[in-house]
Image (tube, rainbow, N blue to C red):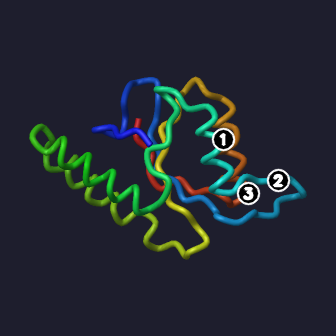
Amino acid sequence: MKTRTSLVSNSSSTSFVLALKKDPVPFNGLPIPTAENFLHFVSDLEDEDNQILARNKRELLHYIDHVIRENTAWWDSDTKESYYQMKDLGNDLDDSWEIISVEISYHEPMIQYVMKLMQYAGAMKILQERG
């Protein structure tokens, strides 16, 4: 896993905090990716614009702490507060969900398509989008 000091590395990508179903979701006979499948998919396409920032809630909390430590000097209080609020994302979900963070290029239509399919099937929730 790469460590960034901010959630958005450039203007051609968007960072997401996502909730993904851990187990398969039946949807009209289509194979809908699970959290593990989606992470493998992003990993296979990984480059500077498509990457996994956190594979689970524990990694996400560690990542947020790192971002806060590295950026405190130049952030305004609203930005800092928004990162502290990220720590609570997904707390209302049960254990059937995995909380992850990824950075996805605007120019990667296949990942965008899979994300839309997973959302439509109820296998993904976008908890936060920055970009």
Q: Which mark is residue 3?
A: none
Frontmost of labels 2 and 3 is: 2
Residue 23: give x, y in percent of width and height. 70, 66
The answer to whether the residue labelled 1 contacts the one labelled 2, judged by CB atoms less than 8 Å apart, is no
Residue at the image point whose x is 40% and y is 62% from the top: 58
Which is more N-terminal, label 2 or label 1?
2
Which is more N-terminal, label 3 or label 1?
1
* Secondary structure of residue under mark 1: helix
Residue 15: give x, y in percent of width and height. 44, 40
Query: How far apart are labels 1 and 3 at the CA level?
Result: 18 Å
Residue 112 vertical position relative to residue 115 in the rendered view, above or below: above
Residue 115 vertical position relative to residue 121 in the rendered view, above or below: above
Residue 61: give x, y in percent of width and height. 34, 59
Which residue is tagged 1? 41
Frontmost of labels 1 and 2 is: 1
Q: Is residue 113 left or right of residue 18?
A: right
Query: Please, what is the three-letter code of the amino acid marked with disc 2?
Result: Pro
Q: Is residue 105 left or right of residue 8?
A: right
Q: Is residue 48 left or right of residue 125?
A: left
Query: Please, what is the three-letter code of the amino acid marked with disc 1?
Result: Phe
Q: Which mark is residue 31?
A: 2
Query: Please, what is the three-letter code of the amino acid marked with disc 3?
Result: Ala
Residue at the image point whose x is 33% and y is 51% from the top: 63
